[in-house]
Image (cartoon, helix red, strand yellow):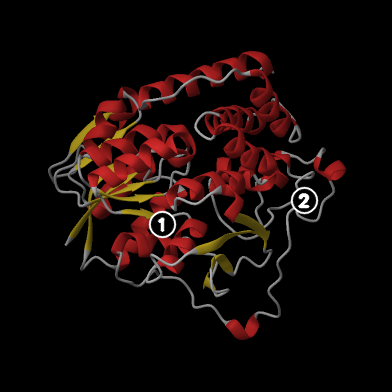
Amino acid sequence: MKGISILGSSGSIGTQALDVIKLNCDSLCVVALACGSNIELLESQIREFNPSLVSVVCEKAQRELRIRLRDYSKPIEILCGSEGLEAVTKADAADMVVGALPGSVGLKPAFWSLQAGKELALATKEVLVMAGKLFMEQVQASGIKLIPVDSEQSAIFQCLQGNLGHEVKRILLTASGGPFLMKSAEEMASVGKEETLRHPRWKMGPKVTVDSATLMNKGLEVIEARWLFGIESQKIEVLIHPQSIVHSMVEFADGSIMAQMGTTDMRIPISYALAYPLRIPSGTNPLDLTSISSLSFHKPDMSKFPLLKASYDSLSQNENVYPVILNAADEVAVDMFLKDKIPFNSIHRICLDALNLIPCRRLESLEDIELFHEEVSRVVRAKWDRPS
């Protein structure tokens, strides 16, 4: 029985990971859960999966959960804050940690999992965006098993199985194009929050859905792939693929291209990560190839999606620092957009402004990276966040 700790159990990845575990309860079990403030959902997860340890965001949430579980008879430890998050990550009974915390908050727990020698199913792309070089150095030094959960990175990872040692000519990252693929730049200037959050293919959290609309999500994946697979950004190409059937491809030196295909359901890459190197039931509907009339691919319009270009530029100009600035600025900008403080087209303006104005510095440790990320966030918010 493989013990699983889930960081971000109330989010999209976390809830779908629990779906897969429930379907494969003969080989997988939940030992610990970390959640933010969705106490009602966490309570139901506790009663269904019986973890021995859980963590919530703050003491208020901790008190509420304890009240809700007054009739719960099974042994459970309820912690909160950073201490609780670390305990869930390092839980003795856990063989694997699912890193599904949104944004930069997932950075430190990913490093904790390395320290504890846990297998890591990583969905938090910001870990590699912010600290790619440092993190991969520690992954290699620790010898832990790192399996990506993002559908695109999982697809690449799967295509590389059995092909390690062969020269990779290109990585082809596919992108649905988001909800505004058919809109012009002028039309995108007036889109609202509700329209932005209506993704045509994937069911995701609000932050990643907004990033998909700006193609920032794909830019972050370019940076992520650069470190995860140790390949130069010049060999990573983004292709718009509206059908979202091919999740990514790898082209080898001999001209062969391997692709991973499937339905648009995150339970496929999640199940692959949880059971790697085995394949287990994911609960998804089979892909009906006869119903697919065509598969189309085309290059993205960099002028329409400037944050994708900015992501490539960040790797060519200062790959250890610029991605940190870009990520911090995007987190602040998306947060302001979701709170109706800025229009959609201000997201990329804020990010480009931050890249141009914030001076670089040497980032040699995890603490350096975290402090710089916080500083960039403060600077960006001070300049752009006005009382509504």
Residue at the spot of label 2: 301
Q: Amino acid at mark 2?
A: Asp
Q: Residue 375: where, in percent of width, then height?
A: 51, 17
Binning the other alpha carbons within 10 Å of mark 1 as few (below 14), some (14 to 19) or many (20 upward) gives: many
From the image, which quarter does the N terminus lie in?
A: bottom left
Identify the image quadrant of residue 165.
bottom left
Q: Position of residue 297 (x, y in %)?
A: 70, 66
Task: Please name whichever residue, 265 or 231, is drawn nearer the observer in this view of the structure.
Answer: 231
Residue at horizontal 68 percent and vertical 47 percent from the top: 213
Looking at the picture, how far across and down is residue 75, in whole percent? Answer: 12, 43
- Report if the CB atoms under discs 1 and 2 are less than 8 Å apart: no
> With respect to residue 251, does 317 lie above or below?
above
Residue denoted by label 1: 16
Element under disc 2: loop
Quarter of the image where the C terminus is located: top right
Q: Is residue 152 left or right of residue 163?
A: right
